[in-house]
Image (cartoon, grey):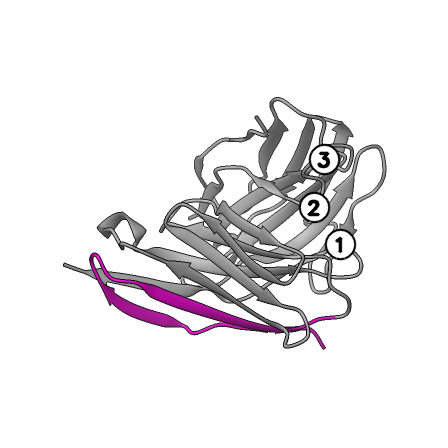
């Protein structure tokens, strides 16, 4: 079966750094997405990795290792507005997005 | 670019009525549209995938006669929840993909529709 695992909830302090991990087992791989979702809103795109390595975009970075079936989202200089759920999703061989359950990130002052 | 709109954003209806939700791609042609449902504190659940001009492909467990999907044009897809019941209350989100565009693997999400069935 297809499976995506990420922690249910994480807590971090404003101004700090947090890393949200995601491991996956899917039938085929055509890329991995990270989305941010605030409560009651639709997901918004953060990053897309299809090759191994680190992609940096401002305060957010995303890393991928295809051989390990592993990705992480790194958030630096955390702000209160970063409190949200972070969804990891993998595009499988049929170009279907397989979603993780999401990681709820709580930022404390 | 790549903006997807949904209408209505929120709807409250009585049990037994039908509700239509529209999803539009505003500045691109959506070759494929997806409909998701999300219950509180749960992840997105794909309901169906639709390609313009063809019948939607429903995920296992989703009743196609209850959730009618029409993707009549490259910019519009509709989801009709027929004879809605309280258990259908959820957050419905559409997304669209443009296979001909530079971000062909990305799904662009609409803002979602909150359905409450009394």
Q: Which quadrant does the C terminus of chain A fall into? A: bottom left
Give the percent coordinates (x, y) of residue A95: 75, 54
Residue at 20%, 58% in the rendered image: A14
Write down the quadrant of residue A96 in the picture.
bottom right
Provide the residue designation for mark 1: A95
Q: Which quadrant does the N terminus of chain A fall into? A: bottom right
Identify the mark at residue B98; answer none if there is no mark: 3
Residue at 30%, 63% in the rendered image: A17
User: What is the span of residues highlighted in magenta in the rendered image?
Assistant: A1-26
Q: Nearer the viewer, residue A3 or B37?
A: A3
Letter of the chain that mark 3 sits on in the rendering: B
CA gap, disc 1 to disc 3?
12 Å
Numbered disc 3: secondary structure: loop
Say whether residue A52 is left or right of residue A86.
right
Say whether residue A56 is left or right of residue A29.
left
- Asked if labels 2 and 1 touch by Cβ distance under 8 angstroms, the answer is yes
Asked if one can make out residue B89 in the rendered structure from this viewpoint, the answer is no
Residue at 56%, 48% in the rendered image: B84
Identify the mark at residue B105; answer none if there is no mark: 2
């Amino acid at each position: 079966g297809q499976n995506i695992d990420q922690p249910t909830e994480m807590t971090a302090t404003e101004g700090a750094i947090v890393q949200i991990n995601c491991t996956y087992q899917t039938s085929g791989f055509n890329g991995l997405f990270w989305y941010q979702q605030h409560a009651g809103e639709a997901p918004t795109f953060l990053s897309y990795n299809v090759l191994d390595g680190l992609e940096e975009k401002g305060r957010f970075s995303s890393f991928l290792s295809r051989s390990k079936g592993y990705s992480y989202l790194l958030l630096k200089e955390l702000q209160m507005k970063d409190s949200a759920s972070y969804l990891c999703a993998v595009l499988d061989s049929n170009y279907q997005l397989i979603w993780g359950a999401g990681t709820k990130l709580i930022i404390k002052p | 670019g790549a903006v997807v709109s949904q209408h209505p954003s929120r709807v409250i209806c009585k049990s037994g009525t039908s509700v239509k939700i529209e999803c539009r791609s505003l500045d691109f042609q959506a070759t494929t549209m997806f409909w998701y449902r999300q219950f509180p504190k749960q992840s997105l659940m794909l309901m169906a995938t639709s390609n313009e001009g063809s019948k939607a492909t429903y995920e296992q467990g989703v009743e196609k006669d209850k959730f009618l999907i029409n993707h009549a044009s490259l910019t519009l897809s509709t989801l009709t929840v027929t004879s809605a019941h309280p258990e259908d209350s959820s957050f419905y989100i559409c997304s669209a993909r443009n296979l001909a565009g530079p971000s062909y693997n990305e799904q662009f999400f609409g803002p979602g529709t909150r359905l409450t069935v009394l």
